[in-house]
Image: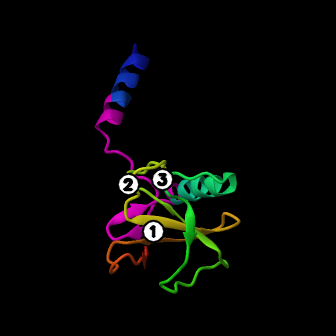
Amino acid sequence: MLAKLLIAAFASVALAAPAVERAACATRCATQCYWQSDIDEAVAQGYSLLQSGEVAGNYPHQYNDFEGFQFPTDGPWYEFPILNTFHVYTGGPPGADRVIFDGDGNFDSVITHQGASGNNFVLCHL
């Protein structure tokens, strides 16, 4: 009987507890926070499609770095959408944010059209 009361008490506390937040942001694009798992999943999907020669929408495609960013790896670089819905992009409207990776699937950066002029990008930061 005591065990049942304790289980019921813990269950009611668990239901009343606030939702646990995800890990800290790895990067921010304007007000959008992306966790490392979001970035890793987007890069993995983009690189997998690149290797197979397939695309989702028009992605991945080569990123030409007209803005002159300094990436940790050498090009060619590829861009792939990272969605603020926290789902992996499979086609349709790509949103404003992109992961950048090299031809070996190494992550380079997250960039966004938000706050950029024209069709340019700006770097996302923490």
| Residue situated furthest top in the rendering | 1
Q: Is residue 100 left or right of residue 119?
A: right
Residue bearing mark 1: 27
Looking at the rendered image, the disc whose residue lies closer to the viewer, 1 or 2, is: 2
| Residue situated furthest left in the rendering | 16
Q: CA distance from mark 3 to mark 2?
A: 8 Å
* Quadrant of the rendered image containing residue 111: bottom left
Query: x%, y% of residue 81?
Result: 47, 60
Residue type at mark 3 is: Gly
Q: Residues within 10 Å of mark 2 (few under 14, many from 20)?
A: few
- Check the image and report above or below for 63 versus 4: below
Residue at point 40% right, 17% down? Answer: 4
Residue bearing mark 2: 93
Residue at point 53% right, 56% down? Answer: 42
Residue bearing mark 3: 57
Q: Residues within 10 Å of mark 3 (few under 14, many from 20)?
A: few
Residue type at mark 1 is: Thr
Magenta includes 16?
yes
Q: CA distance from mark 3 to mark 1?
A: 24 Å
Magenta includes 27?
yes
For the record, the magenta segment spans 12-38
Query: x%, y% of residue 99?
Result: 51, 65
The kind of secondary structure element at disc 3 is loop
